[in-house]
Image: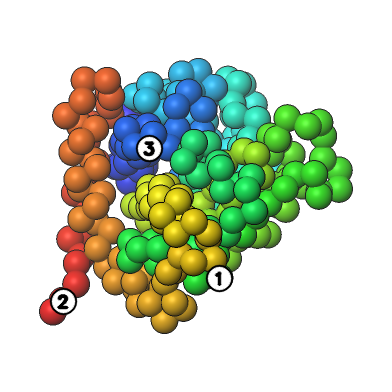
Amino acid sequence: MSLPPQLQQTIRLLIRANHILHHHALVDAFGHISIRHTLNPSQYIIAAYDPGAPALVRSSQDFIAYHVADSSPVDSNAPQGYSERFIHGEIFKRFPEAKCVVHSHSEVVIPFTLGGVDVKPVFHMAGFLGAEGVAMSDNTDVEGRKGLDMLVKSACLGAALASKLSEDRPVVLQHKHGFTTYGRSVEEAVYRAIYTQSNCKLLSQAIAFAGDASKVSYLTAEEANACRIMNEKCQDKSFRLWLREVQASPLYENQEGEPEKGKVAGMRM
């Protein structure tokens, strides 16, 4: 069945965003990315459990649409989906401007959910993290949680996670689990995910060199804000490279065709 052009472009972009996150080791068989439905903003789209693994999604048939209101499937006969879809639904519900949500179990980031070290930006590409550092979410603090498997598989857990996010702090760490971020576009959400991971890698090295996290030179509030503004103007440049990398790999298939080239932004000097 042919898709409306606007929705087809969205699916093409979502397929490739899944591939980009895998290529950068932000997801493996687990982890996920969603997008708000282009034609119906009260819905969002995310991969089904099968094929599920982000590297393997390749067509519109690999996705499920859910209602933002309660993360129930739009199609009552939809196949099995992700139990953690509530992360996505509750963030879309809390932030009307959100167009994309990324959830990662990055092994570079997870140590920072364990060791009591705040994640703050240490280089210009991560200014969006904010000088105050990244918030932390812990399922064990949430009333009505179920089990100890660390999964956000209910609306109350998803809402608790979403409450830790804000426009100024668009990334939240998840204790013993990973992290989640969102963006006003697919490009912005993917950018934030990739550079959260890069920042954590550099931060861990800086702490090793300094011998103590308190001795590391972090971005000041002014620097973080200026870098955030600069980076928002250049996200298209990063995304074009990441897109080409997965297009060139035989691992990643896209039966829907390639997404259209986005607007070329950049900084006007």
Q: Give residue 132's mark.
A: 1
Q: Position of residue 152 (x, y in %)?
A: 69, 39
The structure's colour scheme is rainbow
Looking at the rendered structure, the kind of residue marked 2 is: Arg
> What's the residue at 81%, 31% (across, down)?
147
Q: Quarter of the image for the N terminus: give it.
A: top left
Q: Quarter of the image for the C terminus: give it.
A: bottom left
Q: In the shown orientation, is residue 38 left or right of residue 5?
A: right
Q: Residues within 10 Å of mark 1 (few under 14, many from 20)?
A: some
- Residue at the left extreme, as displayed: 269
Q: Are marks 2 and 1 in contact (CB under 8 Å)?
A: no
Looking at the rendered structure, the kind of residue marked 1 is: Glu
Q: Considering only order in the chain, which callout, 3 or 2, is on the residue closer to the N terminus? A: 3
Q: Give residue 21's mark.
A: 3
Secondary structure of the residue carrying tag 1 is loop
> What's the residue at 27%, 20% (across, down)?
251
Secondary structure of the residue carrying tag 3 is helix
Q: Residues within 10 Å of mark 3 (few under 14, many from 20)?
A: many
The correct choice, above or below, for 170 with respect to 200 in the image is below
Q: In the shown orientation, is residue 65 left or right of residue 231?
A: right
